[in-house]
Image: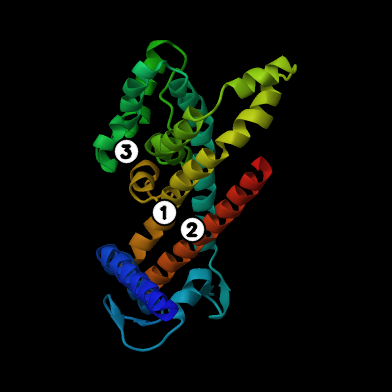
Amino acid sequence: MPHDASASESALIRNETRRRWSLALPALTVITLLSIAPLAVMVAYSFMQAGQYAGVEPGFSLDGWRAVFFERDFFDDSLIPATAHLSILGRSIALALATTALTFVFGIPTAWFIATRPQSSRGFWMFLITVPFWTNLLVRTIAIQEVIRADGTLNRILLATGIIDEPLQMMFTNGAVLVGMTYVYLPLMVLPVYAAIEKFDFRLSEAAYDLYASRLYCLRRVVLPLMWPGIIAGSILVFIPALGAYVTPRLMGGGRAMMWGNLIDLQFGQGRNWPLGAALSITLTLVVLGALIWYARRAAKGDQANG
């Protein structure tokens, strides 16, 4: 009898396992076809030889990976660091970090403002935050470009008020790219931070004030630790797309502020060096993976500290 009960329980477990796998199969298929398979193709291309006019040719080669970090010296054909690639990588990481920092600076007060409004009006303010997502990224980038260009709205206002005598040249600089990406990705910081603040028990801050804590001390030791999950989520949502941004740097930076995504496009397009483009793509993926691991560890430390 016990044997029959054990066999019946094992059969139930197997049936439940098969049912779960059958339910997950469509999602796993989509993930495999649209994510894993293209990534595998990029990995394979990065170890192939470049075609004469484009594409790849069969044959193992490390030229694509070597070209990511090294280039041939013009005089003696020796390998030297690819300073251009390293400079673009450094600029991409710096601008992505700066974008994350600026969205944090502007996103925290915005999310706090919305979370502290009456329940009846929060939906309206959240509606205003999500409105930019209704339009294409290209349209949003062109919109901010119209604001800061030489004959744009901002320069017209400054000239009309007499603050400046001639238009400010802000386009096609790292600053223009930073402004554009901050505008584009700001809602991605506001939404998760708002979700964290909405769950905040404001009686904790009142208790801190009753114990003579200053506003700064209360913010640093009471509010921010409890907002940490939302901050981590918002930082991830902003940093990753900002690191691989293509449209905004292309329009706002032109050829003067190229980022990693633009470099990848250049190799697959005009450069016609698909192995190098694939190696650059995998390098970007590894950098993003490293950032995710770092963020995960920071989140785990924050949870331990709060616990």
Look at label 3 and name its amino acid. Answer: Thr
Left or right: 146 as drawn, with respect to 66: left
Mark 3 neighbour density, 10 Å: few (under 14) some (14–19) many (20 or more): many
Mark 1 neighbour density, 10 Å: few (under 14) some (14–19) many (20 or more): many
Whichever of labels 2 and 3 marks the residue nearer the N terminus, that label is 3
Tell me the residue at 48%/31% (across/down).
107
Residue 185 screen position, x and y as percent: 40, 39
Judging by the rendered image, the residue that carries numbered circle 2 is: 288
Disc 1 is placed on an element classified as loop
Depth check, mark 3 against mark 1: the one in front is 1
Whichever of labels 3 and 1 marks the residue nearer the N terminus, that label is 3
Judging by the rendered image, the residue that carries numbered circle 1 is: 244
Whichever of labels 2 and 1 marks the residue nearer the N terminus, that label is 1
Left or right: 205 as drawn, with respect to 12: right
Disc 2 is placed on an element classified as helix
Tell me the residue at 37%/21% (across/down).
122
Is residue 273 visible to the viewer in this orientation of the structure? no
The answer to whether marks 2 and 3 mark residues whose Cβ atoms lie closer than 8 Å is no
